[in-house]
Image: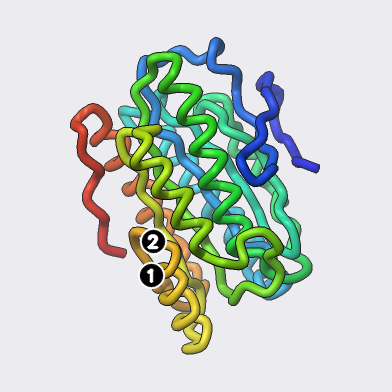
Amino acid sequence: MPKLLGNTPMQTHQTLHNFQFSAVEVSNLGAPDYTIVTIVQDTSTSVTDFKTEMESTLKQILDACKKSPRSENLLLRLVEFNSGLNELHGFRELRDIDPTEYDDVLSCRGMTALKDAILDSTEATEVYGKQLVDMDYNCNGIMFIVTDGDDNASTVARDPALIKEAFKRIRTNETLESFNTVLVGVGTDPHIIQFLDDLKNDAGIDQFVKMGDATPGKLAKLADFVSKSISSTSQALGTGQPSQPLTF
């Protein structure tokens, strides 16, 4: 079940592969255009050692985005994955998210359903993006997947071709003006890095960032990278072009 945070009225939606997600009702939105942002966070057992630091990183990202000139044009969804998927909150306007909601928000346990989490988040973006576009909103999107492990628990998207097909639907159906995807690999294990690099290519993910170990300095750098990437994507909305990938 989703762990919905905050008091924003939400509607529940279902994707092609029967994932469920929530989102603020379109009639309650106030801006003419939006960048749809999803952060997909690994919370398998191996993340336990830097759980608190990762929560701090999420708050830093939120704080930086709230200071952006385009802060009123951002919709954010936060998802965690371990042996299964858990929506911590659905697509909400940034201004309605209190940073204290991210205190002790992550629950580290179990294995790593990485590919299912990517497919879930992509299809949620697809469904909600189409709803916004059909209501004459101009939209683009960006998704960040942060993980330190191999996939050992996915049951739906075992074949990364399913993810690639979902990306293609968003782009060929013009659901969004652009959709950027960033995979962030935490750690230095060569096997994991190779797996993630292969996944990036097989699934058609736009960018693979090798973060290294989850030190305070690297996590601060990650927060800066994510917030600047969100800002760049939002500023590109209306140009007809995706933002240029930033260097980590």
Q: Is residue 136 found left or right of 87 in the rendered image?
A: left
| Residue 60 picture location, percent across and down | 48, 48
- Can residue 217 be seen? no
Q: Residue at x 44, y 63 (%)?
A: 203
In this rendering, the answer to whether 160 lies above or below 180 is below
Asked whether disc 2 touches disc 1, contact meaning CB atoms under 8 Å apart, the reply is yes
Residue 61: give x, y in percent of width and height.
Answer: 46, 47
Q: Which residue is at the far right?
A: 1
Per the image, the residue denoted by label 2 is 204
Q: How is the image coloured?
A: rainbow
Residue drawn where x is 47% and y is 89% of the image: 190
- State the SS at label 2: loop
Q: At numbered mark 1, what does the secondary structure look like: helix, strand or loop?
A: helix
Q: Residue at x 60, y 48 (%)?
A: 120
Q: Is residue 120 left or right of residue 174?
A: right
The amino acid sitting under disc 1 is: Asn
Image coordinates of residue 218 in percent, x first then y, are 43, 69
Residue 88 visible (yes or no): yes
Question: Which one is nearer the viewer's eye here, 14 or 63?
Answer: 14
Residue highlighted by disc 1: 201
Vertical placement of residue 204 versus 127, above or below: below
